[in-house]
Each structure stands twice: as structure tokens, then as C-alpha cells.
Image (tube, helix red, strand yellow):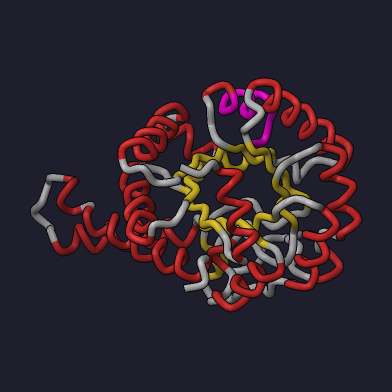
Amino acid sequence: MKTYRECIEDAEKEGVAIGHFNISNTEMFWGVINAAKTRDLPVIIGVSEGERDFLGARQALTLVQSVRKDLDIPVFLNADHTYSYERVKEVVDLGYDSVVIDGAKLPREENIEMTKKCVEYARSVNPDILTECELGYIGSSSSWFDDLPEGAAVSEELLTRPEEAKSFVEAVGVDLFAPAVGSVHGMSRKGLKPKLYTERIREIRESAGVPLVLHGGSGSSDEDIKEAIKAGISIVHVSTEIRVAYKEGLAKGLEENPDEVAPYRYLKTAVSEVERVVGEKLDIFSGK
């Protein structure tokens, strides 16, 4: 089976992207896995600090490792949005495949200092772990919103600049880089879809010299995401959209089975809805 790094290298060569999907429980996990297995595509399971606290950091890893072994599919586990050295150390010591070191809200020098410290520790424990950092603010909550997050980089003057990306990546030594290129975390209740600046993505990929990750994939249009992948995005994060699918699927399952008390019966619809949305995203990311 190919490694995580090899899957990313293949995605870059083929002009496609790998889907990264956040989960909070085993039902969401199986929705993602079912979609990936059906399409024979690699997939990344993401768990933020809050999701790890709810599901269990070690338990999430056990789920991924068991499926990778038993079903023989390239599924990898990413510690998404990790805000401190202590929490990074936790997942590195457990054996996660990758970690997002999120110092985006810190002053630049503090962000560099913390990120570099985390990268150095990760490499000392496991040279194969992939490290990722962010530069630029795109909001911090995977939820519905009425108005764009205050301060989010959705206009050209607020986007990550190519020279910033280059100097930051060189300073901290990460494997993956997530710039602010127009996307935002979460989804608009009003159907607003922020514009992705694909030319800026192309410039940043060239200057940064490492694969790029797009956060906030839920709120972006399919066409924008396709163009972003062509411009240099290798991984696309989706969280809010499958959370919504899960919630709506759960509501439907309860409505259709008002007298049912066995969770595995009324939760089937929630799993199916997650699988449907993840499948649609994987088709877009893989160019199908």
C-alpha cells in the first residue's frame, strides 16, 4: 500500500486532490470509509482537538489503523487544527500520520517559533509524519454562518502572499502548507460562496515549494474547487458539509422510525447521508 506522502505525490502528478473529511463519531467514520472504498480512492480522516476529545485520540487512531489493515485501503489520520505544542506532542507520540499546527492567530514570530518547535519534535519521533501549517485567517468555526467571519481573508489584499508563504515554509520546515486564498471555514446559510483566487494558489505553490492544502472546502463552489486543484491544491478539507449531512440524516432516521430505540437502525440514514456527500466530493476532487 502506498504511503501518505506517495499518495500526495501521485495526486500532484495526476492533477487531482485527496479528500480530507472530519469526523466526530464512528457513524461519520464509516460514511467516509464506505465512499472511499467504493471508489478505490485514498482518503484522510481529520479529527480536530474537540473531535479528538469527544471520540478519543487513541480510539480514532485505532479505527483508522484497523481499517487500513483489514480493508487494505489507503486511509490516513490527521490531527486537524492543533493549537499548542502539548497537543501536537500528544498525537505525534500516539502515531498519527499527520498534524496541522495551527498558529494562525498568533503574531508571526510566535507562530514561527511554535510551529518550528512542533515540526522538530515530530521529525525526531517519526520522520514519516507529515506536518502542516497555516498562514492567513479564514475563520475558526466549522458551522453555519449568516455573515462571513470577521477578519477572514476573502478579499485579495488579505490573502496570503507568495513571498510570505516562501519565507514561512522555509523558516519552519513543514511538509504541507495551507494558505488563505479566499475560502472560509463553515458554510453560509444564505448560500454565499466566497471566491477562490486560483492565480494566487498557483503563485503560492510555486513559491512555497510544498503541496498545498485548501481548508474551508464546504463553503466553496464545485467549479472553484476544480480550478483550485488545477492551480496546485493537493488536499481539500471538508467538515461542515458532512456535519450538516449527518444531522439531517439523523433527523430523517428518527422521523421515519419514531418508535425505534435501537441506534444502529435509525442511524443508518445518517451514515448514508455522510457517504453520499463524501462520495460527491471525492468525485469532484478526483476529476470524475
Which residue is at 55% across, 36% downward?
97
Magenta-colored segment: predominant secondary structure:
helix
Q: Which residues are magenta?
A: 82-92
Image quadrant in which you'd find residue 230: bottom right
In this rendering, is residue 271 above or below 119? Answer: below
Q: Is residue 224 left or right of 191 when viewed as pictured? A: right
Q: Is residue 179 left or right of 99 when viewed as pictured? A: right
Residue 175 at x, y percent in the picture: 71, 42
- Does the segment drawn in magenta span residue 210? no
Residue 102 at x, y percent in the picture: 69, 41
Residue 235 at x, y percent in the picture: 60, 56
- Number of marks in the rendered image: 0
Image quadrant in which you'd find residue 63: top left
Residue 31 at x, y percent in the picture: 33, 53
Which residue is at 85% across, 57% downward?
207
In this rendering, is residue 42 above or below 184? Answer: above
In this rendering, is residue 204 above or below 140? Answer: below
Image quadrant in which you'd find residue 174: top right
Q: Is residue 133 left or right of 90 when viewed as pictured? A: right
Nearest the viewer among 79 and 156 is 79
Nearest the viewer among 77 and 139 is 77
Nearest the viewer among 55 and 145 is 55
In this rendering, is residue 43 above or below 96? Answer: below
Which residue is at 60% across, 70% downward?
225
Residue furthest left in the image: 259
